[in-house]
Image: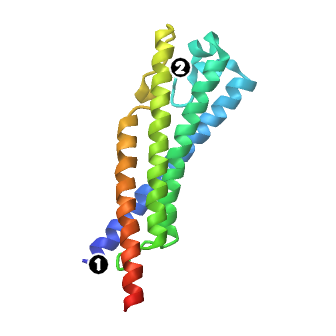
Amino acid sequence: MKTKVDFTFKLLNVTSWIIFIGLAIETGGYITNAIVTLFFNSEWASHFWGNLDLSELYQFDLGLFICLIIGLITISMFKTILFYHTISIFHKKKFDLENPFNETIKDYVFNFAYIAIAVGLFSFAGKMFSNWLILQGITIPSLENLNIGGSDVWIFMGITLLIIAKIFSKGVELQNENDFTV
């Protein structure tokens, strides 16, 4: 049983690292492309990070282009931070199955929930902004291509994690009470 658990945690750790690196590259790509497009070569808007064509938005209104780019960077950055927290919990070896109800894990689950809700809220705002741009007659890539789809899933996950975090809080309280009794 122990080897299955160890293998599962190692697999989750490696997977988290792969996702974290991919998200960090995506965030860096958005930032780099934004800087190059805004300050050096406006033609980069036609082949933005992820092969996005934002040239029509750039030509329509620079301010709206900057708003969309800031939203994309923010969402990507929150996702990167989320997976940074995931790999840090493995790296710091704070997760102990024999004593799962501790302050570190409780705080981790709360932080994870808040970040997931933030991703969901920013994704929802990005979706509404994209829909508004489409109503203005501007052609922009789909929500999936912009990586801002699924806001409802992120919010649902965040709320679910808040409930789990509350359960962890009670578990920590009961475990501390039990430790004092023994």
Q: Pointer 2: residues within 10 angstroms few (<14), some, or many (20+)? A: some
Picture residue at 49% right of the left edge, 63% below the top: 107
Picture residue at 64% right of the left edge, 13% below the top: 61
The residue that disc 1 covers is 2
Depicted 58 relative to depicted 146: above or below: above
Depicted 166 relative to depicted 102: above or below: above
Picture quarter containing residue 31?
top right
The residue that disc 2 covers is 53
Dot 2 or dot 1, earlier in sequence: 1
Query: What amino acid is labelled 1 in the image?
Result: Lys
Could you tell me how far apart the alpha carbons at marks 2 and 1 are, in whole angstroms? 50 Å
Picture residue at 67% right of the left edge, 17% below the top: 62
Image position, residue 79 (x, y; %): 50, 45
Picture quarter containing residue 174?
bottom left
Is residue 175 visible in the rendered image? The answer is yes
Picture residue at 71% right of the left edge, 21% below the top: 41
Image position, residue 182 (x, y; %): 37, 92
Residue that lies at the very extreme toward the right in this rendered image: 39
Image position, residue 86 (x, y; %): 47, 59
